[in-house]
């Protein structure tokens, strides 16, 4: 038995609600809009009428080749807008991007983000940074980097050393070739 239009509309809106937070008013208006769109599509299918893309506020029909939102404007203070589906959330997770068949690296590359740009709302990024500073991470990281640098600088000066592991001597370091 084929599903009724209202059942299809309810499923579509239910999926929207699961991806983004919506108020009761938003849900009701979305349900009406989806239902009316499905009715139009059913009429067009039955009558063989070709559907024309809906016009936006400027009166122009949306074009498929230009994105509705620029990548720079998709990361806002309190939300991030997915450029693939238009979903609004606090952070674009790997789980969400998998639904579009890509990972975070591919998403950044496709839309021109640098690899260091966080795919999270600016307020969330600031809160995480503040929490990390409170825990002392920047100072600890600097100490770790400096210690690593000193170990690397000291390593070439040490030459060849031997260490014992499980009863067998192991050579570490660099060997000089005989000419």
Image (spheres, rainbow, N blue to C red):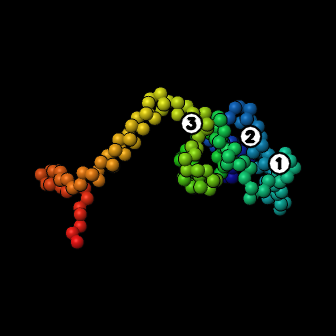
> How far apart are the two marked residues, 1 and 3, measured between alpha carbons?
33 Å
> How far apart are the two marked residues, 2 and 1, measured between alpha carbons?
17 Å
Count of labels shown? Answer: 3
Relative image position of residue 170 (x, y in whole percent): 18, 55
Asked if residue 90 lies left or right of residue 5, the reply is: left
Which residue is farthest top? 134
User: Residue drawn at (76%, 37%), measured in percent from left and top?
Assistant: 29
Q: Which residue is mark 3?
A: 125
Depth order, front residue of 111/176: 176
Q: Is residue 111 visible?
A: yes
Depth order, front residue of 85/162: 162
Crowding at mark 3 (Cα within 10 Å: few <14, some 14-19, many 20+): some
Asked if residue 145 lies left or right of residue 118, the reply is: left
Q: Which residue is mark 2?
A: 30
Relative image position of residue 31 (x, y in whole percent): 74, 40
Depth order, front residue of 71/87: 71
């Amino acid at each position: 038995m084929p599903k009724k239009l209202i059942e299809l509309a309810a499923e579509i809106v239910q999926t929207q609600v699961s991806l983004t937070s919506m108020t009761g008013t938003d849900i009701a208006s979305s349900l009406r809009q989806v239902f009316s769109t499905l009715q139009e599509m059913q009429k067009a299918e039955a009558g063989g009428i070709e559907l024309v893309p809906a016009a936006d506020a400027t009166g122009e029909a949306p074009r498929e080749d230009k994105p509705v939102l620029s990548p720079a404007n998709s990361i806002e203070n309190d939300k991030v807008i997915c450029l693939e589906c238009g979903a609004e959330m606090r952070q674009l997770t790997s789980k969400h991007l998998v639904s579009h068949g890509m990972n975070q690296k591919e998403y950044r590359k496709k839309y021109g983000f640098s690899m260091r740009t966080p795919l999270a709302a600016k307020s969330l990024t600031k809160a995480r940074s503040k929490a990390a500073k409170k825990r002392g991470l920047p100072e600890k990281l600097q100490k770790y980097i400096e210690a690593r640098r000193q170990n690397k600088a000291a390593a070439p000066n040490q030459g060849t050393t031997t260490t014992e592991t499980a009863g067998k001597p192991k050579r570490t370091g660099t060997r000089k070739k005989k000419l």
